[in-house]
Amino acid sequence: MGETARHYYLRKHNLAKAYINGTGCISPQNSIDSDWFFDEVHSPKGDYFEAIEPSYKDFIAPNLLRRMGRAIKMGVAAGNIAIQQAGVKNVDAIVTGTGLGCFEDSERFLLAILDNDEQFLTPTSFIQSTHNTVGSQIALIMKCHDYNFTYVHRGFSFESTVQDALMLFDEGKDTILVGGIEEHTPNYILLNRKANKFQVREPDMPIWMSEKRGIQMSEGAAFFVLSRNKTQSSLACINGIQTLYKPKNSEDILKKLHMFLSSHRLTLSDMDVALMGFSGDLIFDEKLKSLLPEIEKETTAGAFKNVCGEYHTATAFAMWTATKIIERQQLPKVLAISAKLPSKIKYVLIINQYLDINYSFTLVSQC
C-alpha cells in the first residue's frame, strides 16, 4: 500500500490501539540492560555515536551468528529480547523499517567486486545485503511463515511499520513484532564527514540550542511486540501515529498536531511530556525551535537525540524511551528541556523530524 493510500485508510478507519507487551533496544546507551534508565549516559565518539552491542551468543545460535552482519545481529537480538519480555512464542506478522538496510554487507560486496576484479566472489554478503534480511532472519529463527514486510521510507521507515501494524490489527491480526534497524560503517562516516554533514557538539551546549550545522550520526535497533488487546504484560499503548512530508513552517506543523490530537479527543495540554527530535543541526531544527515555545506553554518538553544521535529510525528509540518513561513515571533530567518536570505521566507525545523533510507525531500512553 502506497503512502497516500495508507494515509487515506488511516483517516477513514478508526483503528484499534496497539499495546506494547515487550521491548528490546540496542543503542549508543546501555539500553540492553532492563534496569538502565538514563542514570549513566555515554558520550558520542566525537562527531558520531556507536551502538553498545551485547554478547550476541546470549541471543543467537553460534552457527547463525558467524554469517550475520552487524545490522542483522542487532535486529535479531533486539527482536529476541522483545519477544522474551512479552512471553510469546510466535507472532502473526513481522514488520521492520530501515533507511540504509544492511549497509555493511552491501559495502563489503561492492568492495569485493573492486578488489577481486569481479571474480571469485562469495555470495554471502550479497545475499545478506538486502534491506529485508533482518525481518527474514527473525522469521526463520521463529519459524514464522506469516506476513513479513520491510519498509524503506527514509525518515518514515519506522513510522510506516507502526501504521502497517495498526492496519493489520484492523484486519484481525493479534500479535505483531515491529522494529527499526540502522547501522553505519567507517567508510560511511568518512564520506559524510568529508561532505561536512557531521559536527562535534560542545558537551555543555544543549542539543535544542545548537547554532552549528551538522548532526551526530548514529545507529541502533529497537523492537516491540504489539498486541491488539491489552494483556497483563502490557507496558504502554500506542494511540496513533501521523506523518508529515516537508511542512511549510512551524505553524503548519502546529496546525497538523492540533488536528492529530483532536482526532483522539485530546489537546496539547493533556500531554504530560513531548519528546522532540532535535538533531543539533541549525537548519534542520529551525521549525522545531520555532515550535518549542508553543509546546512549553502547554506541556513539558524533552529531547532524545542528545543520547541516541540521529538516524533514519530514531523514532524507534524515542518510542522505547516513551515506554520506559511511562513505566517508571519519570522524565530523566538528561532528556528534559523544560525546567518543570511532570509529577504524573499518562501521555507522551513524540514529535520527530529527519533532515527537515520527514516529520511525525506518535502518541503513547498508559494502558
Image (cartoon, rainbow, N blue to C red):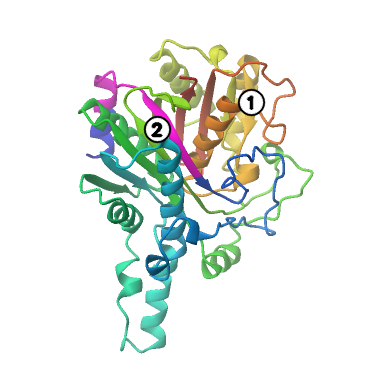
Location of residue 286 (image quadrant): top right
Percent from the top left, x then y, of residue 270? Answer: 54, 12
Instruction: Between label 1 and label 2, give the one nearer the viewer.
Output: 1
For numbered disc 1, what is the local secondary structure?
Answer: strand
Can residue 328 be seen from the camera position used here?
yes
Provide the secondary structure element on which disc 2 rests: strand
Magenta-colored span:
8-24
Amino acid type, label 1: Ala
The residue that appears at 25% across and 20% down in the rendered structure is 13
What is the three-letter code of the residue carrying label 2? Thr
Q: Nearer the viewer, residue 346 or 58?
A: 58
The residue that label 2 is drawn on is: 243
Q: Residue furthest top?
A: 265
Describe residue 54's horizontal placement relative to residue 90 as left or right: right
User: 10 Å neighbourhood of mark 1: few (<14), some, or many (≥20)?
Assistant: many
**How many neighbours does mark 2 have within 10 angstroms: few (below 14), some (14-19), or many (20 or more)?**
many
Is 231 positioned to the left or the right of 169 in the image? right
Percent coordinates x, y for residue 339 in the rendering = 75, 23
Quick check: can you spot residue 223? Answer: no
Residue at 35% from the left image edge and 89% from the top image edge: 117
- Picture residue at 39% right of the left edge, 84% below the top: 114
> Which image quadrant: the C terminus?
top left
- The residue indicated by pointer 1 is 301
- In the displayed structure, 256 sits above or below 121; it is above
Q: Position of residue 44 (x, y in %)?
A: 67, 54
296 lies left or right of 184 = right
Residue in the foreground of this view, choosing between 72 and 7: 72
Report the residue that reaches farthest toward the right.
204
Q: Identify the residue at image location x=70%, y=55%.
A: 200
Marking on residue 30: none
Where 218 falls versus 40 (above or below)?
below
Quadrant location of the N terminus in the rendered image: top left
